[in-house]
Amino acid sequence: MILSNTETIANHTIIGTLGIARGSTVRSRNIGRDIFASLKNIVGGEIEEYTKLQADAREQALQRMINDAKKLNADAIVNVRFTTSVVAQGASEMLAYGTAVKLK
């Protein structure tokens, strides 16, 4: 599956638009990570546990978007974007979305 954050794909011709492909995951923090994060907030620096949580969520949302595009028989996804939102205290959604397309 070809992914692009632009409207076109170099050396390919888009012959059809199949619709929106999307994938999301909701992740929550845990008490152990929150305690450690609170300490990091005091001294400063990267909160690596949260960085890993976000990276894992991003990869899962991306894979789910790809699977959604495959159901549409897409060859590629263009205009790929990510967004996050808080859905509950301590939980956030990572959404990956784009336009599923057919290539020549």
Image: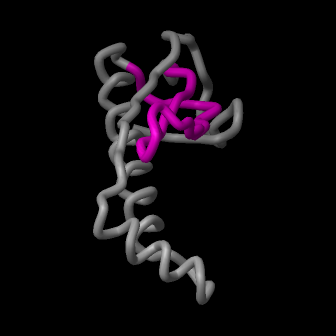
Position in image of residue 60 (x %, y %): 33, 45
Q: For this view, does 8 lie left or right of residue 90?
A: right
Q: For this view, does 84 lie left or right of residue 90?
A: right
- In front here: 16 or 93? 93
- In front here: 99 or 48? 48
Name the image quarter holding residue 1.
Answer: top left
The magenta region covers: 74-101
The structure residue drawn at horizontal position 44% and vertical position 65%, both measured from the top left corner, is 50
Say above or below: 54 vs 15: below
Say above or below: 67 vs 48: above
Magenta stretch: dominant secondary structure:
strand
Residue most extreme to the right: 7
The structure residue drawn at horizontal position 35% and vertical position 68%, both measured from the top left corner, is 33
Name the image quarter holding residue 9.
Answer: top right
Q: Is residue 75 magenta?
A: yes
Q: Does the magenta stretch include residue 102?
A: no
The structure residue drawn at horizontal position 51% and vertical position 16%, both measured from the top left corner, is 20
- In front here: 85 or 7? 85
Position in image of residue 64 (x %, y %): 33, 33
Position in image of residue 24 (x %, y %): 40, 32
Q: For this view, does 32 lie left or right of residue 55?
A: left
The structure residue drawn at horizontal position 38% and vertical position 60%, both measured from the top left corner, is 53
Residue most extreme to the bottom: 43
Say above or below: 47 vs 73: below
